[in-house]
Amino acid sequence: MLVNLHVKNLAIIDEVEVDFSDQLNVLTGETGAGKSIIIGSINLALGGKASKDVIRSGAEYALVELTFILDRASQREALAELGISVPEDEVLISRKLMSRRSVSRVNGETVTRDVLQKVAGVLIDIHGQNEQQSLLHTAKHMEILDRYAWARLSEPKEQFAKAYTEYCQIQEELSKGQIPEEERLREISFLQYELEEIETAGLKEGEEETLEEEYRRLSHASAIAEGLGEIHQLTSSGNMAASDQIGEGLRILLKLSEYDEKIQEFADQLSEIDNLLTDFNRDIAGYMDDFVVDPQALRETEQRLDLIRSVKAKYGATLEQVQAYAGQIREKLERYQEYDAYRRELQERLQKQEELLQTWGAQITEIRRSGASVLEQEIRAALIDLNFLQVQFQIEIRPTDSYTAQGMDEVEFMISTNPGEPMRSLGSAASGGELSRIMLAVKAVLAEHDEIDTLIFDEIDVGISGRTAQKVAEKMALIAGSHQVICISHLAQIAAMADAHYLIEKKNENDRTSTEIVKMSEEETIDELARILGGAKITDAVLESAREMKELALTEKNRVRS
């Protein structure tokens, strides 16, 4: 359940913090006091869309934090599947809104909006203003029925969804694969040309780099030969060759060493140089003997490089990309060459998927029909509790003309609110106030069958009054006997049933408006009930009526929960 809400710098909220009770929490206040902002902040924290102007004027960011306590092992398991660790049955959800971005965290770990919304689905059910309008769409009817029967439906729906995805992919492939014969033959010819060009090129790993090096050598062969000749002449031949000069110097040093022994060291060093130069001259002479300027080899190397670069320019920047493209061509070519067999294979696969769809779809339909027969009775009973005294309610399940992601059915809620009137769809038979009560009946029934502990109702009492309002209040109190309920209301009947009553009001300080929320005492609750009942002027009689209403509500609350 939701135990704490902390909001800072959001719209006209400076900073508020609320601790909720585990039963019926009712929030009341004057119109425009900011009641919907409180519920809106919970929606924001759970991944709802936010605009830049929600950040309070003058603030750099807005922050909403929700603290939940897990009451069910199934909730912990569901969160673990989403990668959320819950060390002590406590879940802290925070969302920080800034001008350019927002950051959401669950127990300190940053999460995506998608994960956040899935976490919300485990923890809370929010009925926002005008959500009852969703009952006008049959897709919502199916969603309600499937949620009711989810324990049995989850596996067949998962298997159906897999088969449906594969079925659609095969259909798309079949549609794309319808090629005229002339076009197919032309495509085969083109693919064969491309594949032959790649295979004939016979590209090898590292070949281009080796050829580039060889091309540089061959294209500069004349310059290399000329340069090496000049070096050889400088070091080993000619009048001023280095080898002759060193030999003459060595002869002088050897003669001088007869007079000074230390000069022998210089002679030894120069002798080593002479030996190195002799080796150098021998090696360079051998290289020059083998070196050949070959124009034919240069042309062949250049042609090979051009071919490699041409193939890469067409089919891929690297050898791996060219090979991958060739693989795609072979696969496509095989498909075109074996076109009839390929089409037959797709048809067989499509038939197999259709058989799976029929199998799982039939199971889904059976489960829905079974669940609908019970759910319609429970919703009808809940509607009677909400002052639909002679209501008839029915869930129709009809086959669709084609497969959909949800199965082979369409689901529609039918209702007759007065004796003698035929059953009609909700959209044409129910008024706005009636839709609110129908949605409350649905929520009440679902609350008894799912794992969500916290339900939030934002002004579900719109369009109702009198005896009907009392019935709605009693239903809210009943739901709160086994679930945490947080409700924004304008009705005294619902406020009187509160286990915890909060007042939301605007305050003006230093030319700034802010919304505050406080939990009221027993006596303060009486005063707020009197305000709701009496309007601008609160007399002693109104106060007495408020006190009596609170006492009667306590008696009725104990009755419905017993």
Image (tube, rainbow, N blue to C red):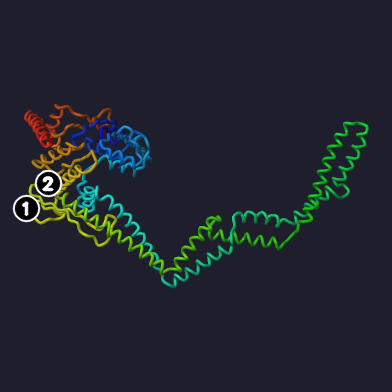
Asked whether the beta carbons under mark 1 and mark 2 sit within 8 Å of each other, the answer is no
Name the secondary structure under disc 1. loop
* Residue 63 x/y as whole percent: 32, 34
Q: Nearer the viewer, residue 31 or 522?
A: 522
Q: Residues within 10 Å of mark 1 (few under 14, many from 20)?
A: few
Q: CA distance from mark 1 to mark 2?
A: 16 Å
Q: Answer with the quarter of the image where residue 354 lies.
A: bottom left
Q: Is residue 18 above or below residue 290?
A: above
* Residue receiving disc 1: 419
Residue 36, position as x, y percentages in the image: 23, 38
Please, what is the three-letter code of the amino acid marked with disc 2? Answer: Ala
Residue 101 or residue 235, whichever sits in front: 235
- Residue marked by disc 2: 381
Q: Identity of the amino acid at label 1?
A: Pro
- Label for residue 87? none
Determine the residue positioned at 28% across, 39% down.
Answer: 75
Mark yes or no: residue 12 visible.
Answer: no
Task: Please report the residue visible at 18 percent of the width from the left and 28 percent of the height from the top.
Answer: 520
Tell me the SS state at disc 2. helix
Identify which residue is drawn at 91% across, 40% down. 251
Q: Is the N terminus in the top left, top right, bottom left or bottom right quadrant? A: top left
Is 431 on the left or on the right of 167, as rendered? left
> Where is residue 139 shown, x and y percent of the image?
23, 53
Residue density around tag 2, few if under 14, some if 14–19, many if 20 or more, within 10 Å:
some
Residue 478 x %, y %:
14, 38
